[in-house]
Amino acid sequence: MVEKNKYKQLNPLWISVFVDILGFSIILPFLPYFLAEFGASPIIIGFLLSSNAIFGFFFGPLLSKLSDNYGRKPMMLISLAGTFVGFIILIISNNIIVLLISRIVDGIFSGQFPIAKAIIGDVVSPEERPKQMTNIGITFGLAFLIGPAIGGLLSSYGFIGPGILATILTGFAFIYTLIFLKESLPSKLNKVILKDTSLNIPILDAKSLPFWKNNKTLVLVLQYGFIAIAGGILQTTFSLFAGVRLGLEPFLIGILLTLLGVFQLFFRLLIFNRLRESIGDPKTALLGLGAYVFSYLFIAFVSQAWELVVILLFVSFAGSMTQGIITGFLSRSVDNRNQGKIMGISSGIDNIAQIIGPIIGGILLSFNGNLPYALVLSLLCVVPFILGFKVLKFGYDNRKLLNPEPISKEVMNSEILC
């Protein structure tokens, strides 16, 4: 309750992100319907699923970067309005082309996720950002659990049932955001900027450099990228792996994914924060990165369903330990004028992972045995694990109470001119 009151201005973010992810997950139960009703080939269905990520890759970072210039709130409202239109098109979809258009429109206006992370970077103190970034992950997980369930329960109505419900939720999110979301972009506000003592420099003085010239940001982007690609491969080809290698039925695969999602949510809510407060954010993330390396490697030895369940529990544990923390570190590595840009880059990486994941995973599963699949996933996580030892030296420890030092508007303006 304390955290909710402390950052109650973040409440509209959870709704906006939920609606954004719901737009993708709600159509997953309709994949067999596409084949039967529209006569769509697997290639067309694959493009249909990836179209949202493809257009999100180009336009999500753009909207997020525009929020650095024109404000978070207007760009968030534009993103929600575009998602609303995408759902309207989904309702009237009567062929695969119109359905594809609805997914493209939703992808073009997929700015909710990166803009929400940028707002967290604006209003949350540096040492608490990993926790709030993890809350975005919880919202993401809830949407992925509820979305397919909604699609399945309302599938008897075709696209109209899920589409109408999603449209109503998006309309509510738009109105709620319009009324309750406060503008947080520092340049739009006459507010002091906090000093992050782990950087030993004011946040606004943290070098407005391209991320490839900012050593800390570059390390964290590489970490994030390798983890996202490995995760993208597993997420997009897990059903194929479970079905082809273990003979699991789609119903059992769905139940398994739901249980894993519930486990991850409970872990994040009940254990994650206690652990990071005990050993600190950098060591928590490093522990999770190490768990990724070994969990993925042991996929090579899976021959029964229960073995896969155990391994996926460890993968969920690793994800809970790392994703929110690394995203929070990314936010801390740049100044306030570039929060939208760096969060847009991270979301672009996520989209790339969703695009190339099925391709790489499909190729790996074409080989005999599980070893190629497991080995590539594990090796992809070795690099971020090694980089984690460098991140330990960045001083991003949530247990160290920062001593915010206000910076006057005159100093802020002088830094911008430099």
Image (tube, rainbow, N blue to C red):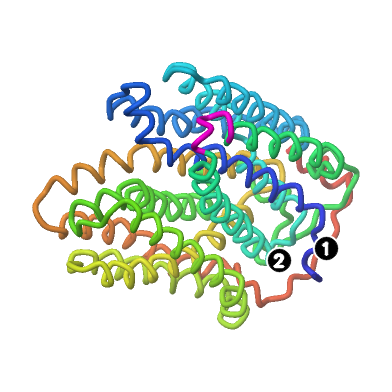
- Residue 33, horizontal then vertical, whole percent: 38, 32
User: Which residue occupies 63% across, 42% down?
Assistant: 19
Q: Within the magenta stretch, is there residue 397? A: no
For mark 2, does the 10 Å Cα neighbourhood hold few (<14), some (14 to 19), or many (20 or more) residues?
A: some
Residue in the picture at 30% in, 56% down: 380
**Residue 68 seen in render:** no
The stretch of residues the image draws in magenta is 155-161
Q: Quadrant of the N terminus?
A: bottom right
Which residue is depicted at the point 56% across and 60% down?
324
Locate residue 35 relative to residue 166 in the image: left or right: left
Position in image of residue 8 (x %, y %): 82, 57
Element at label 1 = loop
Q: Which mark is residue 271?
A: none
Q: Which residue is mark 1?
A: 405
Viewer-proximal residue, 204 or 256? 256
Q: Nearer the viewer, residue 246 or 215?
A: 246
Does residue 36 appear anywhere in the picture? yes
Q: Is residue 160 magenta?
A: yes
Label count reads 2
Query: Can you name the residue that lies furthest to the bottom here?
Result: 278
Please name the amino acid that badge 1 sits on. Glu
- Left or right placement of residue 343 versus residue 405 in this view: left
